[in-house]
Image: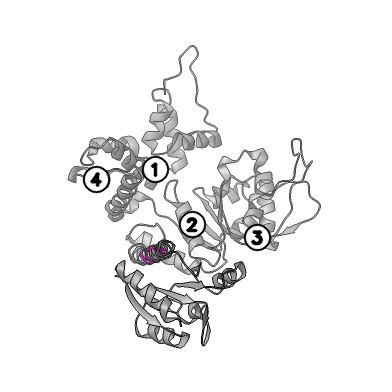
Amino acid sequence: MNRILIVDDEDVIRRALRRLLEREGYRVAEATSLAEARQSCASQQSDLAICDLRLPDGEGIQLAAACPDTPVLIMTSFASVNSAVEAMKAGAVDYIAKPFDHEEMLLTIARILKQRRLERENQHLRRDLARVYPIDGMVGRSAGMNQVCETVKKVAPTDTTVLIRGESGTGKELVARAIHAKSPRAGVPLVTVNCASIPEGLIESELFGHEKGAFTGATTGHRGLVEAADGGTLFLDEIGELTPAAQSRLLRVLQDGEIRRVGATTSRTVDVRLVAATHRDLEQMVRDGDFREDLYYRLEVMEIHLPPLRERGEDIPLLAEHLLDEACTRMKRPRLAFSAAATQALLRHRWPGNVRELKNAIERAVILADECITPELLALHTPREAAPERRGMSMDDYFRRFVIEHQDTLTETEIARRLGISRKALWERRSRMGLPRPRAQGARAPVE
């Protein structure tokens, strides 16, 4: 039962309000001055204070500062826009004029109390979530993930550049979002860019902007994504795909905090915290002349290595349950569970597509399931079929070999599913690695 404190020096108003509120089931306390109101708040917490604007010993809005944990509804017979503005600025949650309508008063009280209840529930949920998942959205208790979480906690409060490394599908963007969420820049949006998805000829314009007339088709000026991240965090995924010219411009941002739009003659100052990610071997790219050495050392200030899912065996059941809950909630399905055989299948699988593959498999199973998740619904292929022979073979080498071996017999959808990636990701990697899908002469394209 909610407790409401009425603060007014007029006996008639207090009695009328008490009768109204007690009929609605509220517990009521009274005070005739600011001093009495402060004493009442100190002795027992109220869920709401309804306070007159003019009191014998001061302004009613002063109660909001004196009792910050109690929402204050101001009422006054001196109704005016200025009074309302001043009351809200001072911390009042709302404003109502005397003489008030009973229904209006009750509706206002109900709305304020509902909002307060939601805020408290939100605080409790955040505390519970922080205890279960100390880093936003990152699930796991393996040694590798514990190390990742500890590093995120230490580096997030700084402005240090971070390089996140790991195979495709391990959750590099999730780590970047956790770093931003735990940083002093959390109040400013995180700007995320997948460098591999931007055509080579447009990447400089997209990242750094351009001036009107800078090139054919540039009919207006354009603010780049680096400028959009000013004051916040810029996450560059697949940074190994940047062109040499874009690498040079990014180096200047890191060194001097300056950008120059394409076609501009002057520079602009930006305050950006950079978090980058890659699954590629940047050291080899430096040796091959494909990545600037000075930029590499600017990025390497702090590295976070995300372990592949196959090295996080003890995390798989926990992560699977988390993804299952998410999928059921998103699809408005009743709570499902994994059968014992399905859990064993999850543990045996090699997960070449890592967490992304696991998420896709569970989402597919939730769509098809009636009562529980079985191995058949997960549609996991044998380790021999799905996993690379990793002795001396990189993920790119395995991808190339798998695609070439199966592209004549499988559709693009089937290839993507067996690799545990989306068709869009398959197309992007084909384009990047120079693996266009061949069409046999006179043959009909497979039906997707």
Q: Nearer the viewer, mark 1 or mark 4?
A: 4
- Front residue of 368/285: it is 368
- Front residue of 23/376: it is 23
Report which residue position mark 4 lands on.
336
Q: Where is residue 258, by image quadrant? A: bottom right
Q: Tell whether label 4 touches label 1 (CB within 8 Å).
A: no
Give, as a single range, the part of the protein colored magenta: 114-122
Q: Which mark is residue 177?
A: 2
Cα–Cα gap, marks 2 and 1: 21 Å
Q: Quadrant of the C terminus?
A: top left
Earlier along the polypeptide chain: callout 2 or callout 3?
2
Q: Amino acid at mark 3?
A: Leu
Earlier along the polypeptide chain: callout 4 or callout 3?
3
Residue 391's x, y, as percent?
Answer: 38, 44
Q: How is the image coloured?
A: one colour
Cα–Cα gap, marks 2 and 3: 20 Å
Residue at disc 4, secondary structure: loop
Q: Residues within 10 Å of mark 1 (few under 14, many from 20)?
A: many
Q: Nearer the viewer, mark 2 or mark 1?
A: 2
Residue 380's x, y, as percent?
Answer: 29, 37
Report which residue position mark 3 lands on.
254
Q: Where is residue 15, by image quadrant? A: bottom left
Is 283 a magenta residue? no
Q: Tell whether label 3 touches label 4 (CB within 8 Å).
A: no
Residue at disc 1, secondary structure: loop
Report which residue position mark 1 lands on.
353
- Front residue of 63/169: it is 63
Q: Where is residue 293, by image quadrant? A: bottom right
Q: Amino acid at mark 2?
A: Arg
Q: Is residue 277 left or right of residue 291?
A: left
Q: Is residue 440 left or right of residue 337?
A: right
Residue at disc 2, secondary structure: helix
